[in-house]
Amino acid sequence: MNKRKNVVYEAAQLYYGENLTMERVAERLGVSRPTVSRLIAEARQTGVVTIQIHEEMRPQDPLEQLVAEKYHVNAHVVRAPSSYSELRWMRSVASAGAKLVDSLVDSGTTLGVAWGSTVSEVAQYLPRRLLEDVTVVQLNGAGNAWNTGIAYSGSILGQIASAYDAHMVHFPVPAFFDHAETKEAMWRERSIRNVLSVQREAQVAVFGVGAFGGKIPSHVYAGGYFDKVQQAQARVAGVVGDMCTVMLREDGSWEDLAVNKRATGPTPRDLKKIDRRVCVASGAHRAAALRGALRTGAITDLVVSSRLAELIV
């Protein structure tokens, strides 16, 4: 194993440190060019080589500037061919979101993750970097009356934890309790208090914005958490979507909504205690929900498709 690590390091040093071509590296190491290509790829996958793009050096997109000025966030607008399907748009945005999240994670980081359709895609694009003492903590419960939600939320957390060789902390509660009193009682339990304390230690959070409808439905509305009657009642109350399963109106209000007394995700007030809060969003049907989320002031960094960015400005 150590011999393999030495060869990987030497290949990376020759290729990146001495700027040799792959052909010259192959000659120096006495191996084939395809072998050098695999060694270089392994060097990046295992963290021997890291490539950093300085976002502050990138020319700002005029649309990014509009979003940044209107909502006081660091805006990252993703452009793609108009022929893209909704899924390809989401994946383009998720890829950009993964790059931003990855740039904020280092050894010792506690990363808070709120499950959802978009974050599920973000998890798949994170590069593998073996860091030390990274913790990935679930921010919102995932269970409902029909299943625990562990398979869904656990898959997302597992992919992210695997990328950084991180310790994973689950949040073993439902997304919404049936009764606010039950939530209050659970929040006094030591096992739950321990998870909440880890959440409070997070320096970075990543989440999406849920909304009704759309070609790619938000999991909270398509996964059995609300039936049609409950969704209709939410709409009557002015709800346009959610952030971390906390329901929002388009004007950014949320505190007086009764359903939020039963919700287990962090409120906008809780999120504001985390240094960097990355929201990744795509899909025109999320426009009203994203406006509401931005108006809470809980988002510091927004990664958004150009289609959706145009709608919110």
Image (tube, grey):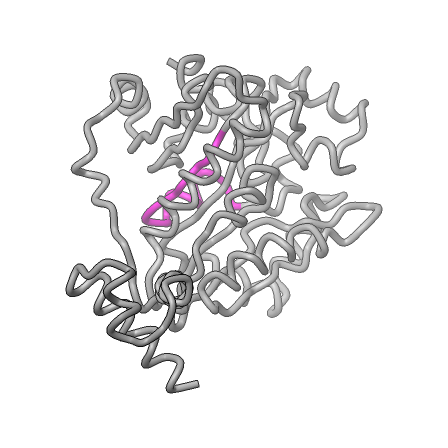
Q: Where is residue 194 in the image (x, y as percent from the top left)?
A: 54, 67
Looking at this view, is 206 or 202 the one in front? 206
Which image quadrant for residue 131? bottom left
Q: Is residue 269 on the magenta stretch? A: yes
Looking at this view, is 311 or 293 the one in front? 311
Q: Which residue is drawn at 61% across and 36% down?
A: 260
In the image, residue 54 above or below residue 210: below
Q: Is residue 231 on the magenta stretch? A: no
Query: Is residue 130 something that shows in the picture?
Result: yes
Residue pushed farthest bottom? 2
State left or right for residue 155 relative to residue 307.
right
Q: Which residue is drawn at 54% across and 51% down?
A: 139
Q: Residue at x 36, y 65 (%)?
A: 36
Q: Where is residue 151 in the image (x, y as percent from the top left)?
A: 72, 55
State left or right for residue 163 relative to residue 231.
left
Q: Range of the magenta residues?
A: 266-281
Q: Position of residue 103 (x, y in %)?
A: 32, 51
Which image quadrant for residue 129? bottom left
Quadrant holding the N terminus: bottom left
Residue pushed farthest right? 146
Q: Which residue is drawn at 32% across and 23% down?
A: 71
In the image, residue 215 above or below residue 197: above
Query: Is residue 109 something that shows in the picture?
Result: no
Q: Where is residue 29 in the image (x, y as percent from the top left)?
A: 29, 75
Looking at this view, is 95 or 285 the one in front? 95
Which image quadrant for residue 75? top left
